[in-house]
Image (cartoon, grey):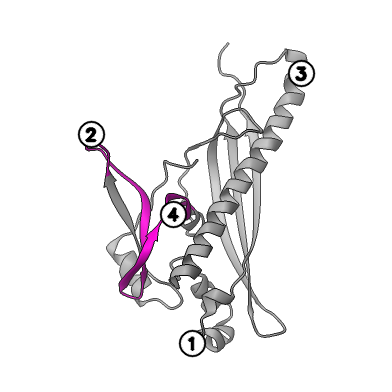
Amino acid sequence: GVRENFLVITLQDFVNDLLGTGIDPVLPIAETTKDGAIFIQSAAAFKESKIAGVLTPAETQGLLWLRNQIQHHTITIAGSATAKQSVELLSTEANIKVKQTETGAANLQIYIQWQGALKENTQQLPATEQQESQEKIIAMTEDALNQQIKQTILAAIAKSQQLQSDFLGLGQAIYRQEPQLWQSIAQQNYLSNLQPEIYINGELTFLGDTAQ
């Protein structure tokens, strides 16, 4: 899973979210290991100025993807369908597009784009089969990472709806893109009615073995 990323929130970020429209604040939670090392893998979500609940590490990763805070680093993916793979993220981008439906509801489309390089190939195969194998590994790894990203985002949305805390800023996206629509739903329980569509588009290249 993605472990190296953690939420970075400045005091100004917190104040902006606290005073902002269609968004609630969130703060990282610092924890310590048995040997005293500090790490951050979860976050506290607020409803206005009060803590509404705590996000799991997976939910926090979904938050990071939607807030464009995924740092460029190495992700290790372990699954039954592929050998253990390490992907170096080269670029990531998240966009939310808002449209008003015929019934006056908000339709949100979340687009995640990422580019990465496959750093490891633990499959030991003859050279004649290597290229075909690499293509299959890339396709499986792209799919595995796409699914991993989607599941973390879905988890974050579900937690936002459960807590009724818009720490993802979905309402802010509606407010900025469709201000009249926002005015019609702002006083309603709008989070519970949102069913965002999620589209993940990843592009993976293979670096190959570095050993000569």
Task: Give percent across and percent down for residue 87.
Answer: 55, 35
Name the residue carrying label 4: 60
| CA distance for labels 2 and 1 | 48 Å
Instruction: Verify CB contact (< 8 Å) between mark 1 and mark 4.
Output: no
Task: Give percent across and percent down for residue 135.
Answer: 73, 30
Disc 1 residue type (three-letter): Gln
Outermost residue on the left side: it is 36
Instruction: Verify CB contact (< 8 Å) between mark 2 and mark 1.
Output: no
| CA distance for labels 4 and 3 | 40 Å
Instruction: Verify CB contact (< 8 Å) between mark 3 and mark 1.
Output: no
Mark closer to the observer (3, 1): 1
Q: Quadrant of residue 165?
A: bottom left
Name the residue carrying label 1: 187
Mark closer to the observer (2, 4): 2
- 115 vs 163: above or below: above
Disc 3 residue type (three-letter): Glu
| CA distance for labels 3 and 2 | 46 Å
Task: Give percent across and percent down for residue 190.
Answer: 53, 79
Residue 35 badge: 2
| CA distance for labels 3 and 1 | 60 Å
Name the residue carrying label 3: 129
Binning the other alpha carbons within 10 Å of mark 4 as few (below 14), some (14 to 19) or many (20 upward) gives many
User: Sequence order check: which comes first, mark 1 or mark 4?
Assistant: 4
- The answer to whether residue 169 is seen in the rendering is no
Task: Give percent across and percent down for residue 160.
Answer: 47, 67
Disc 2 residue type (three-letter): Asp
In the image, the segment drawn in magenta is: 32-61
Mark closer to the observer (3, 2): 2
Which structural element holds mark 3? helix
| CA distance for labels 1 and 4 | 27 Å
